[in-house]
Amino acid sequence: MFVSNPFTLLSQFISPIFMQVYMALVIVAVAIGTWLDTYHKGSAKFFMRRREKARAAARRQVTAVEITTLAAKTIGEAVVSGEFGRGKRRVSHLLIMYGFLLNVITTFIMVYGYITAADTPTVLPALWDIGALMMVGAGLWFFFYLRVNIAFDGDPPFSLGRADLFIGSVIASAAFALIWHFVETVSADATVNLIFFGLYLLFTTLLFGSVFWSKFAHMFYKPMVAFERKIEEAGGASDLPSLARGRSGGS
C-alpha cells in the first residue's frame, strides 16, 4: 500500500487524462471559490480601505527592508501556526496542515509525472499515505475533542454547522483515500475499486468545491491580515492597544 502509486493502478480502469483534468479543475475551483468568498465578504475592498487608512495615519515610512523582514516573519509564523500559541489546537492544526500539503503535493506529482510510469519513486506513495494518515488522525482528534463548541459549549460531538464543512470533508477525503488505496492493492475487482475511488473523489470534490462555504479560504486571509497588522504597527498606525501604553496608563 505504501509503495504503489494509486493513480497508476487506477489508470488500468480509467484514462490517465481523467485525473489530470480533474486536478486542473481543482485548482480552478479553489481560485473561483476564494474569489467568490472575497467578493461576497468584501474582503478586497476592506483591505484596500484599511491600507489607505493606515497609510494616512502612519507616523513613519516603512522601508523595503522592514517590509521584507515582516513578510518573512509572517511566513515563519504561518509555517509553525504561531497564532495558536502553545497547546493541543496548534499541534492538531500543524498535523492537518502538513498532512494536507504532503497529500496534495504528492498527488500532483504522481498524477502529472508518474501516472503511466511503472517506476514511481516509492517515497511518493509513502508520503501520500502518511499525509492522509496525519489528516485523519489529527482531524478526528480536533473534531471530537478540540472543537470550540464541543470543548466549551457542551454540545454533542456530532452537532454540525457550516464551520465543520472543511474539517469534515478533510477527514472523509483522507479516510477514503486510504481505504481506496488499500482496497486497490488487495483486490483486482474493477467495480470494488471504482466504488471506493468514487467515494474518495466525492469527498475530495466536496473539500475543494466548497471553498466559498467552508473555512478553506481562511488559510489565505490569516497571513494577509497578520502581515497588514505588522506593517501598521511598524508605521505607527495600528489601532491595536499598546501594551506599553496600557502599563504606563495604569501606573
Image: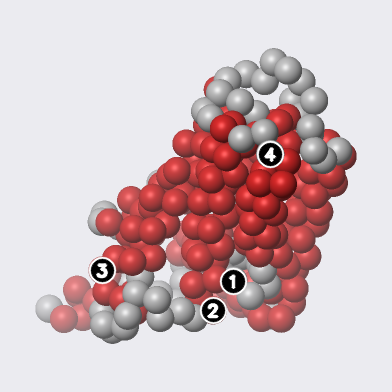
User: What residue type is disc 3 on?
Assistant: Ala
Distance between mark 1 and mark 2 Cα atoms: 7 Å
Q: Tag 2: Cα neighbours inside 10 Å, few (<14), some, or many (≥20)?
A: few
Q: Earlier in the sequence, mark 4 or mark 3?
A: 4
Determine which residue is flagged by label 3: 244
Q: CA distance from mark 4 to mark 3?
A: 68 Å
Circle 1 residue: 214
In front of the other: 126 or 238:
126
**Horizontal arrangement in the rendering, residue 49 relative to residue 250 (left or right):** right
Pick whichever of labels 1 and 4 is earlier in the sequence.
4
Quarter residue 186 falls in: top right
Identify which amino acid the numbered label 1 is placed on: Ser
Identify the secondary structure beneath mark 4. Answer: loop
Which mark is drawn over residue 162?
Answer: 2
Asked if the residue at tag 1 contacts the one at tag 3, i.e. Cβ–Cβ closer than 8 Å, the answer is no
Disc on the earlier residue, 3 or 2: 2
Dot in front, 2 or 4: 4
Residue at numbered disc 4: 189
Tag 1 and tag 2, C-beta contact below 8 Å: yes
Horizontal side of 155 relative to 139 (left or right) equals left
Residue 117: image location, x then y, percent = 76, 20
Cα gap from disc 1 to disc 4, whole angstroms: 35 Å
Counting from the top left corner in percent of width and height, residue 11 is at: 79, 34
Q: On the rendered image, what quadrant is the C terminus found in?
A: bottom left
Q: Earlier in the sequence, mark 3 or mark 1?
A: 1
Mark 2: amino acid: Arg
